[in-house]
Image: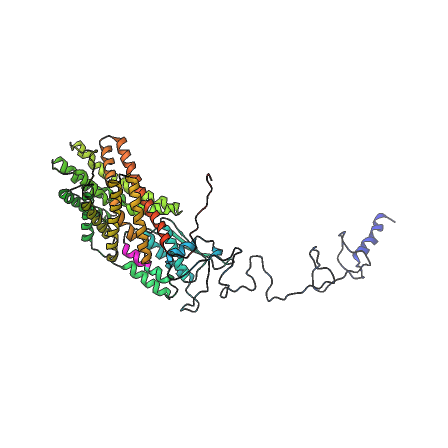
Amino acid sequence: MTEAEDRKPQSDEARSGYDGESTSEITSEFALPKGLAAHRTGGETETTSEFAVPRGLDAPQVTTAEPEGSAFSRPSTYDARSAPAAFTPPTGMPTVSLAKDVPWQDRMRAMLRMPVTERPAPEHRPKAEDEGPAVPRVLDLTLRIGELLLAGGEGAEDVEAAMFAVCRSYGLDRCEPTVTFTLLSISYQPSLVEDPVTASRTVRRRGSDYTRLAAVFRLVDDLSDPETHQSLEDAYRRLAEIRRNRHPYPTWVLTSASGLLAGAASVLVGGGVLVFLAAAVGAMLGDRLAWLCAGRGLPEFYQFLVAAMPPAAIGVALTLAHVDVAASGVITGGLFALLPGRALVAGVQDGLTGFYITAAARLLEVMYFFVGIVVGVLVVLYVGVSLGAHLNPDAALVGAHRPVVQIVASMVLSLTFAVLLQQERSTVLAVTLNGGVAWVVYGAMRYAGEISPVASTAAAAGLVGLFGQLLSRYRFASALPYTTAAIGPLLPGSATYFGLLAIAQNEVDRGLVSLTKAAALAMAIAIGVNLGSEVSRLFLRVSVEKRRAAKRTRGF
């Protein structure tokens, strides 16, 4: 028999099955031996995992209506509409009071510093609508309110607190607002297993209208009040009315206020009646030129540059005409009306509260405004010096022997500053008194106590911040209308002028020293206002958890 014939029967046997039926050829080494019958179960695949249930052990089977999903699928017992109201962390729920007598700024500021999983989420009150407002519309309303607050000069921390208060009032507890200098964004995540909804808005225009700012604060207060039921349509209607409101003071009143502010500032540094009139005229001319540049669409840098020229030009012209008048008082009074104290305080406050990007942007804006003022004054001073004007940088503007006149001038300066900021008439008297108290403290420490001007300025600004926060919390309003105008008498106008004059006369070293002193005074004002605001919380009956701050080790 040949080798081929020997292999033929073997292939025939291989093609035959174990039970005599014709099957496909089995070539695997794991094939069952002939005569060994495999135990088969009906319709199920063979289990090969080591985690399989042993034979004979019946595991309880749970029948589900739908097959089991992935680890990220929603639990079978989860219902978005009847979800539990709060999640209890392992460390317990923090004690946070949401009482009505606590200002919403303090409540929301404390809650924003908590992790999302630790924020208290009480049962939502029933809404007038059956299913509640749509999430995109609530986020849009929140961004529009935040835009008005940020454009009005409010600090980033208070803007975030207001945005969180609006979202929370409509049941959106799991939201995260983010505030930068020109961009607002907010993200809301319905649950841990659903995609977040994010919206953003750009702040393009800014203006100083504290009447509008106060109206927005009242709207947020009404929305966060648990006893007030404000529908989304009512909130949109009130917001539209706020945006359409007219300024409380006409243009001619604002121009007159800028002149009175400059005149009061010139008297504050030792000027007389003629100096008062010259400073007032120069400031009003600068204000009109700035309005003209704004109408032509020029940036604010050029508006400040042009507005600084008329007071300096009048002071130099009086010197060239040999008029017995303190030209330094005229120029200093004009500078008081231009120094950006509001933006400086807001920038330092954002930096101290941890919003470093917004603080850097605000301080950079202040620097551009200040450079514009410097360029405008320096151009006029260079021209005056070249024409033979004898301006003395050593002439000290001291009026310590006129305390009553200075107190009155400081109150007039704060009053006119409040008008320029478009404040409500009900707040003008309080901020005027606050400015007078600030100058009394400064004068007592600087002239009577002979303390350094930086320390005296910081103490007076701290008192302004303290009283401003107490007044704002009493009325559940913003603190800016009570503090910004009150720091007007403390602005470093004379130090800025003498620094610029020294530089114009080629005494750069002396000019830089004076400008450094002006910068130190400005920082003392901003830090003092913020410190007074923080100290004011010690006198408030606030039962919310203290705001959590960043903890860093030294050197890291």
- What are the residue bounds of the magenta stretch? 210-217
Q: Residue at x 20, y 39 (%)?
A: 398
- Rendered view: 279 above or below 112: above
Q: Answer yes or no: is residue 363 visible.
A: yes
| Name of the residue lying farthest toward the right | 1
Q: Nearer the viewer, residue 277 or 131?
A: 277
Image check: 308 left or right of 55?
left
Residue 548 position within the rendered picture, expressed as x and y whole percent measured from the top left? 44, 50
Residue 530 position within the rendered picture, expressed as x and y whole percent measured from the top left? 34, 47
| Name of the residue lying farthest toward the front | 449
Q: Kindly report the secondary structure that dominates the magenta region of the rendered protein.
A: helix
Q: Nearer the viewer, residue 19 or 130?
A: 130
The color scheme shown is rainbow
Q: Nearer the viewer, residue 296 or 134?
A: 134
Image check: 95 left or right of 257?
right
| Magenta span includes 54 | no
| Magenta span includes 212 | yes
Q: In terms of image quadrants, where is residue 382?
A: top left
Q: In terms of image quadrants, where is residue 348?
A: top left
Q: How many marks?
A: 0
Q: Answer yes or no: is residue 152 visible.
A: no
Image check: 192 left or right of 309?
right
Residue 443 position within the rendered picture, expressed as x and y whole percent measured from the top left? 24, 43
